[in-house]
Amino acid sequence: MKLSVLSKKLWCVRKQLILLLTPLLFLPLLFTLPEKEGKCLYVVVLMAMFWCTEALPLAVTAMLPICLFPTLGILSSKTLCPQYFLETNFLFLSGLVLASSIEEWGLHRRIALKVLSIVGVKPAWLILGMMATSSFLSMWLSNTATTAMMLPIANAILESLFGDLETLKQKCKSREDPDSDGINGQCTVKLHPLPSEPMEKQILSTERMDATEQTDRRTAEEIRSEAEYQMNVWKGFLICIPYSSSIGGTATLTGTAPNLIFIGQLKSYFPDCDVINFGSWFAFAFPLMVVFLFLGWLWISYLYGGLNTRLCFKRYDQRAQAEARARALIEEDYRKLGPINFAEGAISFFFVLFAVMLFTRDPKFVTGWSVFFKKGYVSDAVTGVVIVSILFFFPSQKPSLRWWFDPQASNTPYVPLLSWKKAQDSIPWNIILLLGGGFAMAKACEESGLAAWIGGHLQPLAEVPPAAAVMLITAFLATFTEFASNTATIIIFLPVIAELANRVSVNPLYFMIPATVGCSYAFMLPVSTPPNSIAFASGHLMVKDMVKTGFVMNILGILSVALAMNTWGVAMFNLNTYPEWAHGGNNTDVHLSSVASLNEALKEVAEIATQLQSSLIRLENFQKLTELQRDLIGIENLTAPGREFIREGCLYKLTKKGLQQRMFFLFSDMLLYTSKGVTATNQFKVHGQLPLHGMIVEESENEWSVPHCFTIYSAQRTIVVAASSKVEMGKWIEDLNLAIDAAKNEKSSIFLDVGDHSNLFTSSPAISPELPPRYLLGQTQRPNTITHVCWYRNQNLSLTDYLRVNQNQLSGYLLRKFKNSNGWQKLWVVFTNFCLFFYKTHQDDFPLASLPLLGYTVSTPEDSDSIHKDYVFKLQFKSHVYFFRAESEYTFERWMEVIKSAASTTGRIILLIPKEGGGLVEMNGK
C-alpha cells in the first residue's frame, strides 16, 4: 500500500485513533504523580486533548467528568452533577432567552441600520459603524449570532458601493479584463448597485452625464488598481465584524462564555470575594473594549485602505454616486422596517430594564436594590429569570379595552413576546453543558489538590514582576486559544492561574481577569472562534489575511489589557494589595495577622462556650429536678434555687426485716430514700430525708458482715445500706463525701421534713414557655410514665451520666417493623433520656409511644430474621424484637453509634437481691 493512500486512510480515522491512543499515551500520569493529583491531571489532559482535536463533540467531552471523576475516586457524582447548572448558567440562559426575543422581532436589525445611517457610508466610517454595532450587539447576544446577522448587511452595503464581488475578483486576476469592451485601452465595467435589482452600469468619469449608462475611459491598469483597492475594503468589512464581536463580548459578564466561567470559578475558589458583579465588571471591561475597538479600527482601516487620503479626502464623482447608492440602500431597508411596533418597544423596555437592574443590584459605590432582600440571597441570576419569565406572557400587541366590548372582534388568543419553542430552538444547549463541564473540572482540580500542586511548581514565576506576568499570561492564553476553543482554554488554565496568584501572594484578580479577557482575543485563524469561521466561510477571505491582521490585533489586545489592569483596574479592584478574601498562605504578614485574629476569635468562642456549657448544665439540672418533683410523693419545692441533683439509684437498706430495696436520691443539700415500687398514682413515696449538714459516711462491711456495705450517720438517724458492687459503693461514698464537703461551705442548708409540706422556700421557678414541648418531655406531659418512674432506676446514674447521654440525643425519620408484622411504618423518632419516643410526624407535640432501652441490645438482622433491606438495625430484649430501617447509610450509622454509646454509658449492671437464707447473691441484670 502506498504511503499516500495509508496517510489518507489514517486521516479518515484520526478521531478514533485519538480516542484510543490518548488514554494510553498519558497513562504514566497515574503512577508518576501523587495519587489524587495524578488521577485528576489525567482526566484534565484527556479532556484538553479531546477539546483541542474535537475527537468528541465539545459537549460530550464536557460530560466526561461525570463518569471519570467518580470512578477514579476524585469526586462523588452527587458533588459533580450540581456543577452543571450553577447560578452562572442561569444568568447565561437568561441572556440567551432575551437575545432570542430581540431576534424574534428584528430589533437587532433596526439597531444596526440606524447606527450605519448615523455614521455615514464612507468606507472608513462604515467600518467604524460596523464594528461599533457588532460590539454593542455582542455585549448582549452571542458572538456567533451577531456575526451571522451583521455579515449579510455588510455584503448588501458593499455590493451597492462596489458592484458584484465576482466582477471585482475577475478584474484583480489579470492586468486587463478580457471581458471588458476595450477601445484604445479604454473599457467598460459592470456594477450592480443593489443586490435585489442588479443593473448594468458604467463607472462614471469626472464629468457628470445625464445618460443612465456612462463609460469611464481609463486604462486597464487603473481599473485593476481600483478593483484591488475595492477588494481590500471588502475584506476589511468582512474581517472587522467577527473581530469586533469577540471584543464586544468581553464588556459584559453575559457577553461570552469565558466571562461566566470566570465569575463561577471565582465564587468557587474565593467564596468571600464580592468584588466582581455585573456592574463592576462592566465598569472595568467597557472602557477596555472601547480602547481596543478604537485601536483595532485604526489598524483595520489602515491595512485595508479605509484611512488613506485617497478614500477619506479625495472625492471622485463615481465614489460619490456609489456612496449615495449605499446610503439609499440603508435608508430603504430601514424604511421597510416601518415604525417601531408595540412588540419592539416592549422588548426595548425589558432589555433596558434588564441592563439597569444588573447594574444597580450592587454597584459598590452606592447602595443597590439588593439591600431590600436578605443578604446574599438575590443574585444576577434572579434578575435574569424574572425578566425573561415576563417575556413568555407579556402580549406582543397593544391591549385594548374595546376588544372586551366588541362582539365583532376576533377571538384569537394573544401572542406573547416569546414562545418557549422559539427560545428552546435558539438556546445553544451544548454551550451550557460546556460551561458545566468547566465548573466540574475546576471543582475537581480544587478538591483533588491538583491546582495547588501545579501552583507549587510555578513558584519560580514569583520572581517575575506582576505587570510583566500579566502580559505573559494574556499573551500565552491568547496564543493557546487560537488552536482551542476559548471556553476550553479558560476552563483548563483558570484554576492554575488562581493558585499561582495565591502562591506568589498577588491579588488573584490581577492574574485571573487578564486570563479571562485574553481567551476572547483569538483573531489569527479561521478555527479560533465561530465568528472567525463564519466570516472565512463567505469565501472572500484567505488565511493569510486573517493571520496578517490578527497578529497585530493580538498585540494591540495584550497592550490594551496591560493598560487597563495597571490604570483603572488597580483603582477599581485595589489590585496592589493582597485581599483578605484570598486567604493566601505565602504572605507572612497576612498569615500572622490572620493567625492572631483567629486566636482572638478562638478565645472569645471558648469563653462563650464555657458560659453556654454551664447554662446548659443548670438547665439539665432544673429539668431533672422538675421530673423528680412529679415522681416523688411527700416532698415539695424540690426545684428550690441552689439545689442540684447529684445521683440516684437502687441501694439495699438494712432494716429489722433484713435488706430491702430502696430508691436513693442524692442532692447538693440532702439525701432522700423512697420505697422501691410505685404507688397507684405511679409515684414514689418518700420514707426518709437526711440533711447533708453534719453527715458522716463510713464503710462497715466488717461490722455488719454484708458485702459492699456502708453506714450513713446524720443528725436525725443512722442507716446502713449496701451496694450491688464494690465500684458502685465507691461511687456512692465519693459523691456523698463531695456533697457533704460542699454543704459545709454553704451559709445555710436546706432541710425539709417529710411530713412538713409547708412552703419554706420561694416557689420553684416557672418553666420557660419558650422551651419546645419535646424538651419538656416528662415535665409538662406523661405519655409513658414507666419511662420516667421506674425503668432506669434499677441502676445508679449521676448527673454526669445524664449529661453524657444527652450529648447523644438524636431525631429523624425511621421505618419501624415488629418481629411478626409484614409492613413498615414511617415514624419520627426522638432518642433522649435513654428512651425512644415515636411521633407520627416531626410537627407533633405528643408521642404515640415510647420504648425504654433498658436491657435492649442493638445489632444488625441475621439471616433467620428474613429482613432483606438495607440500613436495618435490630433492638432486642428477650422475646421483644423491633426492626428499624434508616433512609441512608449515614443516618443508619449515626443511629447505631448513638444507641450503642448510650448503652455503654449505663454499662453492665449487677443487681443484689435478698437470698432466701437472708444472705445476698450477685446476678447479672440488664
Image (tube, rainbow, N blue to C red):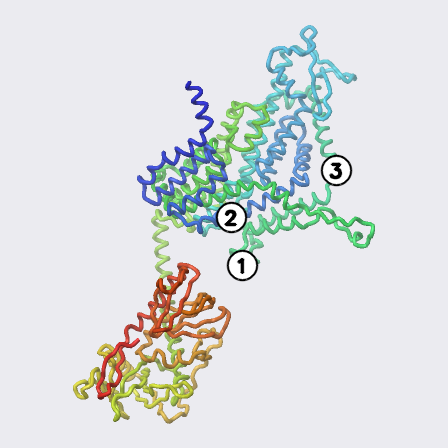
**Left or right placement of residue 356 versus residue 860 in this view:** right
Helix, strand or loop status at disc 2: helix
Q: Which mark is residue 338?
A: 3
Instruction: Give the mark nearest the N terminus, 1 or 2.
Output: 2
Which image quarter: residue 307? top right
Q: Amino acid at mark 2?
A: Phe
Q: Which residue is mark 2?
A: 85
Q: Amino acid at mark 1?
A: Lys
Instruction: Give the mark nearest the N terminus, 3 or 2.
Output: 2
Whether residue 443 is situated above or below residue 828 in the rendered picture: above
Residue 527 locus on image (x, y percent): 51, 30
> Which of the two discs, 1 and 2, sits closer to the camera?
2
**Left or right placement of residue 709 versus residue 358 in this view:** left
Which image quarter: residue 830? bottom left
How crowded pointer 3 is (Cα within 10 Å; few <14, some 14-19, many 20+) is rated as few
Query: From this viewpoint, is residue 39 visible?
Result: yes
Count of numbered marks? 3
> Which of the two discs, 3 and 1, sits closer to the camera?
3
Residue 211 locus on image (x, y percent): 78, 16
